[in-house]
Amino acid sequence: MTEPTPPREQLTDLLAQQWEAIAALVADLDEKAWRRPSPLPGWTLFDVVAHVIGTESWLLGRTPPAHDPLRPKTDVRTLPHVRNEVAVLNEIWVDRLRPLSGKRLLALFDEVTEQRRAALAAMTEEAWEAPTVSPVGQVAYGRFMRVRLFDCWMHELDLADGIGRSIDEGGARAEAAFTELTLGLGRAVVKGAKAPDGSRITIDLTGPVTRQVHLAVEGGRGSVLTAADGEPTAVIRLDSGLFARLRGGRQSAATHPGKVVVEGDAALGDRLVQNLAFTI
């Protein structure tokens, strides 16, 4: 059964809230703080915000600014964290925006996200439902925008961690982001954890996003179940913030001893915990 497309008004409002949260988080940074490392390899806090600007600008039909001839030209394809064509485009946008000050970057962020909010609000329902190429394949444009919400939410965590600031990691934006975080877990349980047929794994998220994710393996394929269908082979219990960072490849469980509890088949559970990371 095809998943229904997220409602346009609701998701547009959540995206606007997400962009406002990012802007508020970095509003008081001085120029030195803007250039602190982020949890993402090769990127500073400045670069994280520049990346969001680049993607939203691309969705507005814009191209990256011209390269400043006074700056050394970077071959972004040679950078170790650039591994595919999407990453190349991301890196070009980031590189071209780096000469800006943090203050100017934030002003540009506000300008671009306000234009995106207006564009989304003006869309017809037909355009919202139209098949669109996205990082998760060809899906309805509205589903693509939930991927955008997930991406921006993850980058809010990156910024908060880079600054060293605690934020509210629950609420409606987080719930929508977690829908994207959990959808592909069937692949992780088979390809990463090498779970055999008949395996049943429950991931118990203890908050601030509270939910249980039930996984099954049958016929060599992993899937996310709507409800448990038997006694789990393994139960993995951890908080949702750590899960998001493990799933996003930002951190490893090894740096958080005692924060992940595995019951049942410990070897299977540990293999999944070690192989949660994915890249969109």
Image (tube, rainbow, N blue to C red):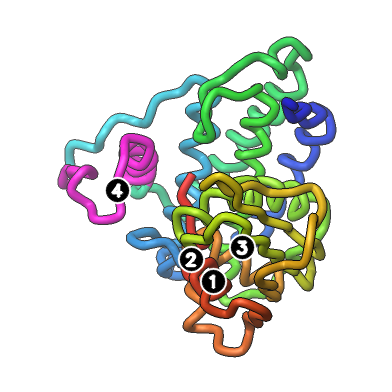
Element marked by disc 4? loop
Look at discs 4 and 1 and give the one toward the viewer: 1
- Mark closest to the chain's N terminus, 1 or 3: 3
Q: Which mark is residue 137?
A: none
Q: In this view, does 237 lie to the left or right of 112?
A: right
Identify the residue under disc 1. 268
**Looking at this view, is 247 or 144 the one in front?**
247
Question: Type of residue at label 2?
Answer: Arg
Look at discs 2 and 1 and give the one toward the viewer: 1
Q: Give the range drawn in magenta.
A: 72-97
Q: Residues within 10 Å of mark 2 (few under 14, many from 20)?
A: some
Identify the residue under disc 2. 250
The residue at the point 46 percent across, 49 percent down is 279
Above or below, comparing residue 212 to residue 180 in the picture: below
Q: Residue 82 carries which label?
A: 4
Question: Type of residue at label 3?
Answer: Ala
Above or below, comparing residue 77 to residue 56 in the picture: below
Element marked by disc 3? helix
- Mark closest to the chain's N terminus, 2 or 1: 2
The residue at the point 76 percent across, 12 percent down is 124
Q: Using the rendered view, name the quadrant where residue 204 is placed.
A: bottom right
